[in-house]
Image (spheres, grey):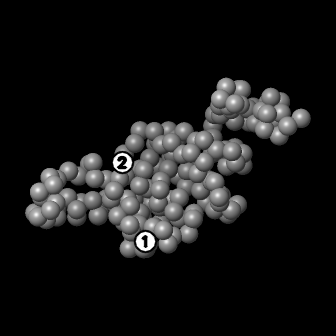
């Protein structure tokens, strides 16, 4: 799918039309598609992906693919955004860009973000509060700085 179609996939629940209207491409279908195109382009502009709208998503660089994934998720209008290991496989420059993107999303969309991540540089750069799990049990929780300096956390993640 193209970059634009990826974001539109997240919008379909908010712009309903019937199956018959879609198959026959009736006026309501065309009107809703036009609205979805406009909304999807707005989201792509926010993430500086508008120039890639017609590009196949698989052909985007890895960092831009992550931005597209976030844009698609935001198209569903969530109240909470869950990001599971978003920096996995990224180089330091891509991780820094991702950190800025997550901060931007949190502020612009006034959204709570639940982040599951092992990259402590990313975590410390964007999180206000942390809960650290060790083998599925809460080890500690609190302000980011305090948690990252907790001896139990250091021992659990870095060894003794």
In three-dimensional space, the C-alpha distance between marks 1 and 2, rounded to whole angstroms, equals 21 Å
The total number of labels drawn is 2
Check disc 1 and report the residue beneath it. Answer: 56
Q: Is residue 127 above or below residue 12?
A: above
Discs 1, 2 touching: Cβ within 8 Å = no
For residue 135, side relative to residue 105 (left or right): right
Give the x, y percent position of residue 93: 67, 63
For residue 2, side relative to residue 69 (left or right): left
Q: Secondary structure at mark 2?
A: loop
Packing grade of label 1 (10 A; few <14, some 14-19, many >=20) is some
Q: Nearer the viewer, residue 62 or 52?
A: 62
For residue 95, side relative to residue 113 (left or right): right
Check disc 2 and report the residue beneath it. Answer: 76
User: Quadrant location of the C terminus?
Assistant: top right
Q: Which residue sits at x=27%, y=59%?
A: 36
Q: Nearer the viewer, residue 123 or 55?
A: 55
Q: Nearer the viewer, residue 71 or 156?
A: 156
Packing grade of label 2 (10 A; few <14, some 14-19, many >=20) is some
- Sequence-first disc among 1 and 2: 1
Q: Secondary structure at mark 1?
A: loop
Residue 114 — which label? none
Q: Is residue 144 visible?
A: yes
Which quarter of the picture shows residue 24? bottom left
Give the x, y percent position of residue 59: 50, 72
User: Quadrant location of the N terminus?
Assistant: bottom left
């Amino acid at each position: 799918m193209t970059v634009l179609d990826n974001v539109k996939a997240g919008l379909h629940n908010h712009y309903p039309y019937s199956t018959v209207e879609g198959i026959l491409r009736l006026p309501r279908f065309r009107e809703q598609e036009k609205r979805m195109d406009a909304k999807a382009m707005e989201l792509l502009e926010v993430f500086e992906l508008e120039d890639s709208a017609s590009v196949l998503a698989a052909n985007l660089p890895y960092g831009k693919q992550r931005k597209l994934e976030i844009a698609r998720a935001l198209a569903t209008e969530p109240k909470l955004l869950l990001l599971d290991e978003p920096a996995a496989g990224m180089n330091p420059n891509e991780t820094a860009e991702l950190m800025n993107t997550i901060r931007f999303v949190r502020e612009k969309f006034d959204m709570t973000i639940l982040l599951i991540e092992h990259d402590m540089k990313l975590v410390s750069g964007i999180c206000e509060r942390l809960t650290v799990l060790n083998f599925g049990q809460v080890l500690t929780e609190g302000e980011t700085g305090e948690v990252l300096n907790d001896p139990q956390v250091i021992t659990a993640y870095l060894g003794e």
